[in-house]
Image (cartoon, rainbow, N blue to C red):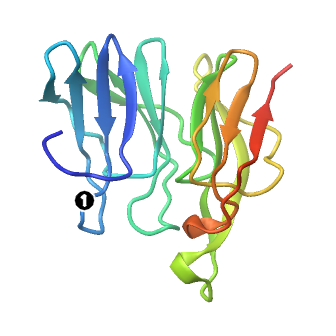
């Protein structure tokens, strides 16, 4: 990459690895977007994200990259934004925003829906170290056919700093933290299925 960043989100389309957003040493996130070509071992600049953010989710649907949520500052500076990048045209479009603004959750395309599970930080605890507080237990799903969001079964408790994957039969969410700020790590695997 052309710059050192943390909290970057990545997705692969047509053999290219796209990196989005993130945070340098400066406390504010950036609108960074570059694509890496493993065949040439080269990075190339792409259309920047419409809004700088980090701790956001990404998922690929029909060859387009959906970037959802994230934050623009601290743990409670969450945004509901949902932007869609088309690698074929190098352009961004808007899609329906998430009902609940969150960051640090997990995004996965499962069963024809883009799920966004959990997230950071519903409410900060002013007495906790490292900005601890209450994580989100929301599980919301974007339907690309109708450009609408659905509310699904909540997680059994708040969870953030997570990722998700699917094998087609379920969405899997391993580990994470049960509170904001990286506190209360867990080794639990959550499994979500649509019937």
Quarter occupied by the C terminus = top right
Residue 114: % across, % down:
60, 28
- Residue farthest along the front direction in this orientation: 187
Residue neighbourhood size for the residue with mark 1, other residues' Cα within 10 Å, grouped as few (<14), some (14–19), many (≥20)? some
Q: Is residue 173 left or right of residue 58?
A: right
Residue 158 versus residue 73: which sits nearer the camera? 158
Q: Is residue 12 visible?
A: yes
Asked whether residue 114 appears in the rendered view, the answer is no
Instruction: Pinpoint residue 23: horizontal percent, then vertical percent.
Output: 30, 57
Task: Write down the quadrant of residue 1 in the picture.
Answer: top left
> Label 1, on which residue?
24
* Relative side of 160 to 19, left or right: right
* Residue at the image point whose x is 41% and y is 25% from the top: 65
Q: Position of residue 175 (x, y in %)?
A: 66, 48
Seen in the picture, residue 36 relative to 28 is either above or below; the reply is above
Residue 80 in the image: x percent, y percent? 52, 49
Residue 164 placement, left or right of 154: left
Up-down relation of residue 27 to residue 159 (above or below): below
The residue located at (15%, 28%) in the rendering is: 43
Examine the image and state in which quarter residue 123 appears. bottom right
Q: Residue furthest bottom?
A: 127
Q: Quadrant of residue 113?
A: top right
Could you tell me which residue is drawn at 44 percent across and 57 percent down? 71
Observer-nearest of 94 and 165 = 165
Q: Residue at x 54, y 77 (%)?
A: 131
Relative to 105, say whether 125 is above or below: below
């Amino acid at each position: 990459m052309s710059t050192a960043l943390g909290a970057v989100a990545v997705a692969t389309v047509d053999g290219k690895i796209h990196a989005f957003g993130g945070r340098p040493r400066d406390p504010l996130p950036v609108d960074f977007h570059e694509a890496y070509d493993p065949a040439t071992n080269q990075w190339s600049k792409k259309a920047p994200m419409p809004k700088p953010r980090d701790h956001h989710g990404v998922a690929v649907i029909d060859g387009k990259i959906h970037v959802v949520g994230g934050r623009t500052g601290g743990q409670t500076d969450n945004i509901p934004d949902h932007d869609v990048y088309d690698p074929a045209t190098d352009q961004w479009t808007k899609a329906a925003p998430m009902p609940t603004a969150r960051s640090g959750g997990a995004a996965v395309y499962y069963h024809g829906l883009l799920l966004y599970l959990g997230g950071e930080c519903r409410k900060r605890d002013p007495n906790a170290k490292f900005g601890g507080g209450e994580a989100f237990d929301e599980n919301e799903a974007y339907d690309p056919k109708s450009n609408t969001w659905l509310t699904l079964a909540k997680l059994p408790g708040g969870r953030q700093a997570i990722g998700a994957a699917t094998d087609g039969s379920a969405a899997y969410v391993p580990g994470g933290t049960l509170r904001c700020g990286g506190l209360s790590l867990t080794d639990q695997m959550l499994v979500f299925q649509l019937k």
